[in-house]
Image: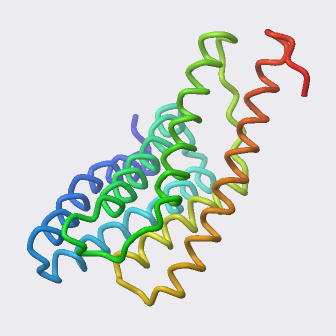
Amino acid sequence: MITLATKITILRILLVPVCASQIMYYSAGHADWHRLLAFWIFAVAAVSDGVDGFIARQFNQQSQLGRVLDPIADKLLLMTVVILLAINPGGAFPKLPLWFPILVVSRDVFLVAGALFIHVIVGEVKVKPRIVSKIATLFQMIALGCVMLKMEPTSMAVTLHVAGFFTAVSFIWYLLDGAKQLNGVVNLKI
């Protein structure tokens, strides 16, 4: 049986291509309603990330499917939007500083590759969600929302730097967690 929390996560996954299409339509033709629709779809998807987690914990609807789909939904949403805003054809959106998409995409690529590597070597991956990672995701979503709303550069810069800081810290923390999981198998010293 699919829980309400998992249904919300699935809805978030389904919103990703709709949001992406609106960003691309806006980039191609600059019709402002595409940008605003993209923003609201992104906002609904971002808020649903917290809602599904709350429902899962509050109403005991945690499931194995939800544990798998939730991070996939987060990565799909963030990676799609950060890549599209970084490419920014035609200069439709304010320019993202190059370090931001590189940091966000690199962290997630390394985390997924690291999890696969640990799964192959150890046989099981123990992912302990960190509050710093949740803060990083929140500020990434806020920063991308600011770009989509074409906010003033100063407020976008502050949000981007806060998101970048927490993204880097969470990346280091997860690397240390992964190294500890490998420690017993390959005898790493940390």
In the displayed structure, does residue 77 sit left or right of residue 129? left
Q: Image point 13% across, 66% down: which residue?
A: 25
Number of numbered tags placed on the structure image: 0
The one of 10 and 95 positioned closer to us in this rendering: 95
Q: Nearer the viewer, residue 43 or 58?
A: 43
Name the residue nearer the viewer: 85 or 116: 85
For the N terminus, give its image quadrant: top left
Q: Residue at x 30, y 58 (%)?
A: 87
Using the rendered view, name the quadrant where residue 55 is placed: bottom right
Residue that protrudes farthest toward the left in the picture:
29
Relative vertical location of residue 128 with respect to residue 33 in this rendering, above or below: above
Left or right, 53 with reference to 79: right
Q: Quadrant of the C terminus?
A: top right
Q: Is residue 164 left or right of residue 13?
A: right
Q: Position of residue 23 (x, y in %)?
A: 22, 66
x then y, percent, for residue 156: 50, 80
Q: Residue at x 35, y 77 (%)?
A: 94
Q: How is the image coloured?
A: rainbow
Percent position of residue 64, x then y: 53, 31
Q: Is residue 95 above or below residue 116?
A: below
**How far across and down, in percent of the image, does residue 146 sit?**
43, 79
